[in-house]
Amino acid sequence: MLKSVTKLIITLTAVFLLFRCIDPYELKLNGYESFMVVEGLITDENASYYIRLSHTFQDNNEIPEMVSDAVVFISDDAGNRHYLYKMGDGVYKTDST
């Protein structure tokens, strides 16, 4: 029993050391102006959902440009659409039903 536990610990340690992330990945996209960023969480709860829309920026010190003139909806595979209402400053909300 002790041999198998020791073997398991050694194996897990080796896997951890071999597959850990050492350097963060920096995405380099050249030749683009801006992308749309959609932030939100949709669940099966009977609650209001919030979506935030913004555009990317080239410099980390810049403030993201919020999208406040979009038509936003959530659709399913049956073709049902649930429209979100503009709340301001790039935030859109569903009703709670």
Image (cartoon, rainbow, N blue to C red):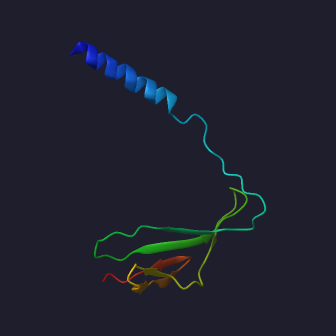
x%, y% of residue 54?
60, 71
Which quarter shows the C terminus? bottom left
Residue occupying the point 69% across, 63% down: 57
Task: Return the residue found at the far right.
Answer: 31
- Identified at 21% across, 16% down, the residue is 1
Q: Position of residue 68 (x, y in %)?
A: 59, 81
Residue 30 picture location, percent across and down: 77, 58
Q: Is residue 51 left or right of residue 64?
A: left
The answer to which of 90 and 37 lies nearer the viewer is 37
The image shows a total of numbered marks equal to 0
Q: Is residue 48 left or right of residue 34?
A: left
**In the image, residue 24 above or below residue 19:** below
Answer with left or right where residue 18 lies relative to residue 30: left
- Side of 70 where 9 appears, left or right: left
Q: Residue 59's quadrant in the figure?
A: bottom right
Residue that appears at 73% across and 60% down: 58
How far across and how far down the image is residue 12, in percent?
A: 38, 26
Residue depicted at 39% across the width and 23% down the height: 11
Residue 31 lies, with reference to residue 74, above or below; the image says above
Dividing the picture into quadrants, the one containing residue 37 is: bottom right
Q: Is residue 96 above or below residue 21?
A: below
Compare residues 63 and 14 and report the one nearer the observer. 14
31 w.r.t. 90: above or below? above
Q: Nearer the viewer, residue 4 or 40?
A: 4
